[in-house]
Amino acid sequence: MISRLRETVDQQNFEAALREGVCEFADFSRIATESEEQFFSGVRVVPSHVGADLDVVRVPECESILSSLESSRQVLIVGASGTGKSGLLWRSASLLQDGPMLIRVLRVSSDSDVQSLIRLVRMLSPTPERRVVVCIDDLGRAATERWPEARDRLLEFSGVSILAACRQEDLLPSIAEGAHLVDSRLARESAARIYARLRAAGFELATEPEEAIHRADGLLMEFVAIATTGRRLREVLRTQLQGLDDTDHADSRELLAVITALHTLGRSVPADELPRLVGESPAIVARRLSRLRDEHLIVSDDGTSWRALHDLRAEVLLDLLHEVPPPTLATTYARSIAAAPAEVRPMLYRRAATRVLRAARLETVSSVADRLTSARRVIDPLVKSIADRVNDLANAPGPTSAREIAALVDAAERLDVSAYVAATLGYVKQITPPTIVESRIVV
């Protein structure tokens, strides 16, 4: 009886991480439904895209990743948005599928997620002879914020290796610790293979491969855009946005701004929140979302939320949508964050402030005092949004109000620190002796 009870409990623990959506066994047998045209326009690559052979095998990059995995237990693919990190991650993992067991981590954002993942891996009993490779994409985003803790515990198992991917801008010391870093920039040999694939698939090619390679600067999505249109991705997306300027669809830009803003912070927008955010009826919002989806600007994975197709596309679109304010970028971020769960909003405010300050080009302001004034001004919509939320909680307190207020006040203080850092960092760099190695400042 006792042994049977233990078997039942063990099985429940084993299934918990899978049932709760923390992870799954990497499955390359599922076939993605996107066409080649949709795929090469830019998508967030997942195992099913590799299973459908939509990607082009980037031999030099994959060889570097697999070679690194032989000599290091933790390999981290790093690069700018649009270099094809996710595709490299899952194609490299697929080349391992006849050997170790592959776990795909979907979420590790809480202590419960960490515990569930560790329990599952422990029950797989990994050893050097029976390896488990834990694969995770999008490190440094909200859904993976507890990864450093999970990684350290996973590496306590002698038979566990880790294959991960992270955007360059999200690469914190805590994420990179102990990892062998692999550059995801597009190799010339891989670019030539992709060009040949585009030609074979019937794409109209606007430039010769050498020109596209030269102009793309190692960015996969830029290479495809230049090869197929002769224009950079920014120019292609600008043309798409101009198509939304007619009277019937001009308000679609407002929806697109909200969706892309939250995407750049690592979140999708719940569909039911959008009518409230933009002040329109569900029917009107649905019609505009349909247009944006048909324009290949947004996508819904599960029918309950919306996101941009790819990180780089989201960043470029968001920048284009704010070339001529109003609204300002900070105002759009403040509005978008209201659609996120309360418990993650403080972190999203901090991330948004970092992005807004980076886009503000404060280096063009002469004095440090003026830079600080400008920095505070550009993030002011975020500060006001936090203050409004704190006032609402104080006037109508609930069981978790005190905790949420404390987190929001902490976020507001960090926003002020971010403004100081943004205002003074340029001056600090000027007076820093060349013998001192610059390190990333995280607030």
Image (spheres, rainbow, N blue to C red):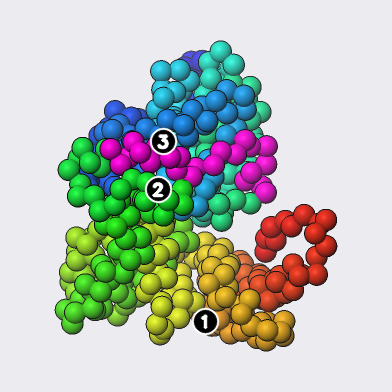
**Type of amino acid at the residue the image marks with label 3:** Glu
Pointer 2: what residue? 213
Residue 152's place in the image compared with 397, above or below, is: above
Residue 126's place in the image compared with 216, above or below, is: above
What is the span of residues highlighted in magenta in the rendered image? 173-196
* Residue 96 in the figure: left or right of residue 195: right
| Viewer-nearest residue: 213 or 10 | 213
| Viewer-nearest residue: 350 or 363 | 363
User: What residue lies at 42% left-to-right and 70% top-to-bottom?
Assistant: 319
In the picture as drawn, the residue positioned furthest to the top comes out as 129
User: What residue lies at 69% left-to-right and 57% top-to-bottom?
Assistant: 440
Residue 239 position in % (x across, y down): 26, 69
**Label located before the other in sequence (2 or 3):** 3
Query: Residue 297 lies in what quarter of the image?
Result: bottom left
Secondary structure under the numbered disc 1 in the rendered image: helix
Could you say which disc has been placed on residue 189 in the image?
3
**Type of amino acid at the residue the image marks with label 2:** Ile
| Cα distance in 3D space between marks 2 and 1 | 41 Å
Pointer 1: what residue? 381
User: What residue lies at 57% left-to-right and 28% top-to-bottom?
Assistant: 68
User: What residue lies at 55% left-to-right and 81% top-to-bottom?
Assistant: 378
Q: Nearer the viewer, mark 2 or mark 1?
A: 2
| Cα distance in 3D space between marks 2 and 3 | 10 Å
Secondary structure under the numbered disc 2 in the rendered image: helix
The local crowd at label 2, few if under 14, some if 14 to 19, many if 20 or more residues have their Cα within 10 Å, is: many
| Cα distance in 3D space between marks 1 and 3 | 47 Å
Residue 383 position in % (x across, y down): 57, 79
Residue 13 position in % (x across, y down): 49, 30
Q: Quadrant of the C terminus?
A: bottom right
